[in-house]
Amino acid sequence: MKKYIFIPLLIVLVVSLALVGCVGNKGDNGALPKVRVSEVIHSVFYAPQYVALHLGFFEEEGLDVELAISWGADRGAAALLSNSADIALFGPEAAVYIAREQSETKLIAFAQLTKRDGSFLVAREEMPNFSWDDVRGKTVIGGRAGGVPQMVHEYVLNEHAINPRVDLEMIQNIDLAATAAAFSNGVGDFVQLFEPGASSIEKSGAGHVVASFGEAGGEIPYTVYHATEQYLKNNPEIIQKFTNAIYKAQLWVQNHSAQEVAEVIKPSFEEDDFDLIVKAVERYKAQDTFSQDPILRPEALDRLQDVIILAGELDQKVPYESVVNTDFAKKAMENIN
């Protein structure tokens, strides 16, 4: 069983982020309350969030949402703990690790956004008859140890009787933001990528999607909005308004085509071709990636903790109630239709 390294890493990150300084929640001169939101990566995977932003659902709820990218759940958690973010989107594993360490400051998951892995396995050549055995003996660019992308990756390999530590070479020391570039420059035989990165690699001819971790890994509470327990207690109205906006966006995405979703979120992906954004949304819709509502259910967290334990990152499960609060999600569903 691995020793816990998450908390020490967080201490370093918290100190670094705290030096950046904080922005107050209340806007100046009567402006809308500013909510600083940290997203773990910037991806079409989080389409409902960008729908809420660009269709004005946050503003409709009376919030001024400011987005920043953390590039990792550990960094997103550190942003919350250092008060350099009010809300952070990442996998619940970070909250689980902190709860397991019985930390004085708790992170609470309050609204789920996605329910499957949003990454894809990309190979250098087209492989129409791909099987997971094809990765044996190969070099694969994966994710950070202890992060949900890497743990789902390992879970899928184990499900196909492949030992990720023995049967292949797994590269885990490349920053998440640089994996696509590394692969394009010749590193590895396969790479794990989110959209629109996967479609962009395909269009460039540098790689081809051969498998979906979302389809292979099944349903899991992949990315969820978190805040500190203290922030939830002190700012219930802001959390409720934020959750309302997310639920409105979830309903909108369910009832509109990939083309329509892509048209709305395009401003968040100005450097990407529109056809790639459409393709990415189509892929995510086809594999039922987006959560239909913001409730993180007990059985979903239980399955995630099974995956974390299998990866050797957790020795025993933490209680559902210690890391999840569904009050805001339930109220949003009661009042919005």
Image (cartoon, rainbow, N blue to C red):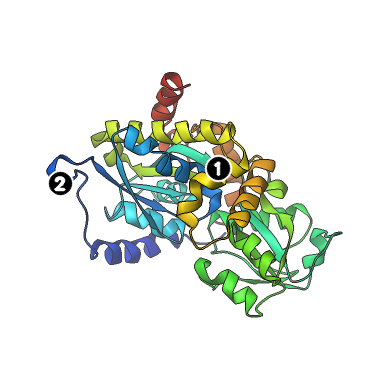
- Please indicate whether residue 14 sits to the left or right of residue 155 in the image: left
Task: Identify which residue, 314 or 178, lies in the foreground.
Answer: 178
Q: Say which residue appears at 67% left-offset and 70% top-offset.
A: 204
Q: Residues within 10 Å of mark 2 (few under 14, many from 20)?
A: few
Q: What amino acid is at disc 1?
A: Val
Most extreme residue toward the top is 334
Residue that numbered label 2 is attached to: 28
What secondary structure is marked by label 2? helix
Question: Quadrant of residue 79 in the image?
Answer: bottom left
Q: Quadrant of the N terminus?
A: bottom right
Residue that numbered label 1 is attached to: 261
Task: Identify which residue, 109 or 34, lies in the foreground.
Answer: 34
Q: Residues within 10 Å of mark 1 (few under 14, many from 20)?
A: many
Q: What amino acid is at disc 2?
A: Asp
Horizontal and vertical percent position of residue 256: 58, 35
Horizontal and vertical percent position of residue 234: 23, 36
What secondary structure is marked by label 1? helix
Taking the image as drawn, is residue 216 in sight? yes
- Please indicate whether residue 18 sits to the left or right of residue 306 in the image: left
Taking the image as drawn, is residue 220 in sight? no
